Amino acid sequence: MTIAEICTREVVVAKRDITVKGAARLMREYHVGCIVLVDEQEGKRKPCGIVTDRDIVVAVTALGLDPEVIRAGDVAAKELLELSETAGVAETVAVMRMKGVRRLPVVDQDGVLIGIIAADDILGLLAEELAGLATMVAREHRKENAERRTAVPGHA
């Protein structure tokens, strides 16, 4: 399964010069914990940064800086991490773990933003898969018990 199959396709985006206050308003309006900063190139959105609610708290609010003056691009991490749409779940988890991030923009082969993947998305997927395995094991036990009862003389 590729990450493109499970990533969120509706991404809240803004240009890097949006104020931190503007970014926070977008997060509140759309009920998200981050926005992806993009550069528009020939009508295509290419990620150039990501700003999280934590970035705003740690880099602006905690320092008493003015969120109406500071730009989101100034708060975004210097190194933009992004993930190819062809990446698998295991590769995504490895990148998140190694880099210590919970969210990654997902791009196509041309670097155009197609979605975002969050650790919560992967946890949901894994929970579903584990629940499916648990159901299969329970059915197998019931089937085996039923077969044993009918195979043993004197049991009905």
Image (cartoon, grey):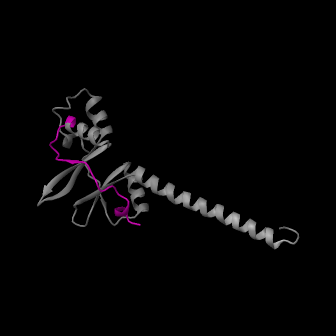
State the residue at coordinates (35%, 57%): 7
Q: Is residue 143 magenta?
A: no
> In the displayed image of the protein, which residue is found farthest to the left?
42
Residue 53 x %, y %: 31, 39
Q: Which of 59/122 is in front?
A: 122
Residue 24 x %, y %: 25, 37
Q: Is residue 146 left or right of residue 17?
A: right
Residue 28 x %, y %: 28, 38
> In the displayed image of the protein, which residue is found farthest to the top?
64
> In the displayed image of the protein, which residue is found farthest to the front?
156
In the rendered view of the protein, which quadrant contains the N terminus? bottom left
Q: Magenta span: helix, strand or loop, mainly?
A: loop
Above or below, 138 against 147 in this view is: above
Q: Which of 151/14 is in front?
A: 151
State the residue at coordinates (25%, 32%): 60
Q: Which of 11/65 is in front?
A: 11
> In the displayed image of the protein, which residue is found farthest to the right?
154
Above or below, 84 against 78 in this view is: below
Residue 108 x %, y %: 26, 64
State the residue at coordinates (34%, 50%): 103
State the residue at coordinates (50%, 57%): 128
In the rendered view of the protein, which quadrant contains the C terminus? bottom right
Magenta-tinted stretch: 1-21
Q: What is the quadrant of residue 17 in the picture?
A: top left
